[in-house]
Amino acid sequence: MKIPTLNPHYRASLVLILAAAILVALALLTNDRDITTAAVVLSAVICLITGIFFATLAGPEPLDHRFVGLLPIGGSISLARTAAGLGIAGNAVVLPKGTDGRGQTIQFNPVASYDGGEVRGQSFVTGGDACGLITVPAGGPLLAELQQNNQVAIPGDTAALADLIRETAVDLLEVADKARVEPGDGTFTVSMEGYRLISGCRALAAESPRICSTHPCPVCSLYACILAEGLGRAVQVERCEADRDADTVTASFTFLP
């Protein structure tokens, strides 16, 4: 049977509390009322207090980012293969709620490209101005959680959206050490340095570099959802790619008519 490994803080607290007990026992056994005994008792108190402090830090270990980054990958690959089998090869386009009377934000993958045509249907769109696949954006549930429980309000101007995405990456989700957001003329680029979930990006790239732009992971999809909701415009994922040497991921988006 495998013996469970204790949290390092918990182990340290046990050692310090045990040391405090031994010191108190030594003081009682010697029964000397001198400066040395007083020093031993004082040391025991210090060990006990420090042990209690470490015990308060003995929470569960954080999740391994390598494993977390791989959690959504199977779904993205399966969806990409299914879409490819149906001849749907267009980049992901996030359409904000209200588009064509819809009550929620959706992701639309056109057969080839999207030119702003009407998107009707629940899953498959055939005929009319646009043909393709409708799905729930991978970042949709994340956005709902941030809005409902983190009181995140989506602004309506580009500069404020850049600040929100930067704060979301570094402070709220804590998926990157640093985020650089560059709004452009009809474009938007997010570069995340020290990206902690890069294992998933590399797994998708190993399958096909196109998957990240056709069926992006929850994080990059979240940014597209924020942009679409903030500006009320269709947002197309142009590219999402990971640096081969550094833990840096760059995602580029384009605003469509």
Image (cartoon, helix red, strand yellow):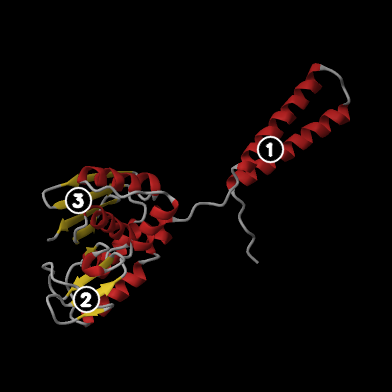
Residue furthest top as drawn: 35
The answer to whether mark 1 and mark 3 are in CB contact below 8 A is no
Residue 140 sits above or below residue 61 on the image: below
- Is residue 104 among the parts visible in the rendering? yes
State the separation of the CA atoms marked 1 and 3: 51 Å
Image point 23% across, 64% down: which residue? 95
Q: Which mark, residue 189?
A: 3
N-terminal-most mark, 2 or 1: 1
**Residue 230 point in image, percent of width and height:** 25, 52
> Mark 2: which secondary structure?
loop
The image quadrant of residue 19 is top right
The residue at 28%/58% (across/down) is: 225
When the figure is inspected, residue 87 is found, relative to residue 231, above or below; the finding is: below
Q: Which amino acid, mark 3?
A: Thr
Quarter of the image with the C terminus is bottom left
Q: Which residue is mark 2?
A: 120
